[in-house]
Image (spheres, rainbow, N blue to C red):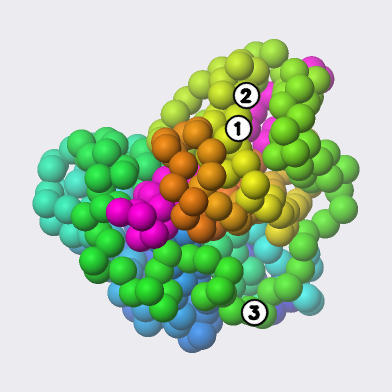
Amino acid sequence: MRGFDNRFKDFPDYILTITQEIWEDRGLGARMKDYYHPQVIVRMPGGIAFGEAGATSATMSTLVEFPDRVLLGEDVIWSGTPQVGMLSSHRILSTATHTNTGSFGPATGRKVRYRAIADCYAKNNQISDEWLIRDNGGLVRQLGYDPKDWAQERLADLDPETQPFRPEVDVIGPYTGTGNDNQWGLAFAAVLERVMQGELSVIAGQYDRACHLEYPGAVSAHGRDAADAFWLGLRASFPSATFQVHHRIGMEDPLMPPRAAVRWSLTGKHDGWGTFGKPTGAEVHVMGISHAEFGPWGLRREWTLIDETAVWMQILQAHG
């Protein structure tokens, strides 16, 4: 790969290797500087941050709180070229023990298991743009908290200039691409768009009857009814919100089923009864990333992440 260290055989190898080197091998000094641009932009539902120094500090704090964290890279779905830069959508399953007090509260000693998906733009061996969603709803539940209560306790510490993340605090970064035009990415984006238009009948038509689903809150589920319940509950909370697909990738690789990654958002009012309870009219921005695998009977596996705690923060900020 032109511009990248020759020891990486391809882009997925680069993403998987540097993740292990930084987190598990404790490459928090020179390695972070090697792999992260000095002005990297990191967007999470909880806020936006700038610069490698801040990313390094946040990584250190997480490792203090969860020192045995292991990051298992389940898949890297990617697009682009080394010449113009490449965008990876990296799905990670983490295991860890809440050993020390930190941003998630007093140490509980509990073992946790949760997913994150990171969309990273890399060129010349460095990441300069990132969109990261961690299943904070699933994480805090495993620590013994309700996501709404956990969000409430942290409202006073938020920086309104950067937290939570919403369109008005965003900036234009070095990556302005929208992915590729592979048929599987187009198909998955079309399914999500139809769902968000209220055409939930698309689930019966496009999902495998035995589909395997991984949803926010560390929820594992199977079957079309579970997909209907998740997407209906989310959309019903924000029925007038605008749904937008920001990025889509489709891929076909040897030894792998066809798969897709879509980054999307819902922006608008909390004006309906659904997953987030009684309507408040609060303005909310929901950042989402979804991965899918396809088989002979339709969409056979789906992973979707939003950060429930960041949604609750926006609702509670507006209406308490």
Q: Is residue 264 magenta?
A: no
Q: How many labels does the image show?
A: 3
Mark linked to residue 231: 1
> What x and y, as percent, mark residue 298?
78, 23
**Callout 1: helix, strand or loop?**
helix
Question: Which tag is nearer the camera, tag 3 or tag 1?
Answer: 1
Is 239 or 68 nearer to us in this picture? 239
Q: Name the residue under label 3.
A: 172
Mark linked to residue 267: none
Question: Residue 116 vs residue 228: left or right?
Answer: left
Quarter occupied by the C terminus: bottom left
Question: Residue 16 vs residue 302: left or right?
Answer: left
Query: Quadrant of the rendered structure where residue 137 is?
Result: top left
Q: How far apart are marks 2 and 1 (CA)?
A: 5 Å
**Callout 2: helix, strand or loop?**
helix
Q: Residues within 10 Å of mark 3 (few under 14, many from 20)?
A: few
Quarter occupied by the N terminus: bottom right
Q: Is residue 95 shown above or below 175?
A: above
Which residues lie in the magenta part? 292-320
Q: Name the residue under label 2.
A: 228
Question: Residue 79 vs residue 182: left or right?
Answer: left
Along the polypeptide, which appears first: circle 3 or circle 2? 3
> What x and y, as percent, mark residue 196?
70, 39
Q: How far apart are marks 3 and 1 (CA)?
A: 29 Å
2 and 1 marks in contact (CB < 8 Å): yes
> What x and y, as percent, mark residue 310?
41, 54
At a point 41% along the width and 78% down the height, the residue shown is 161
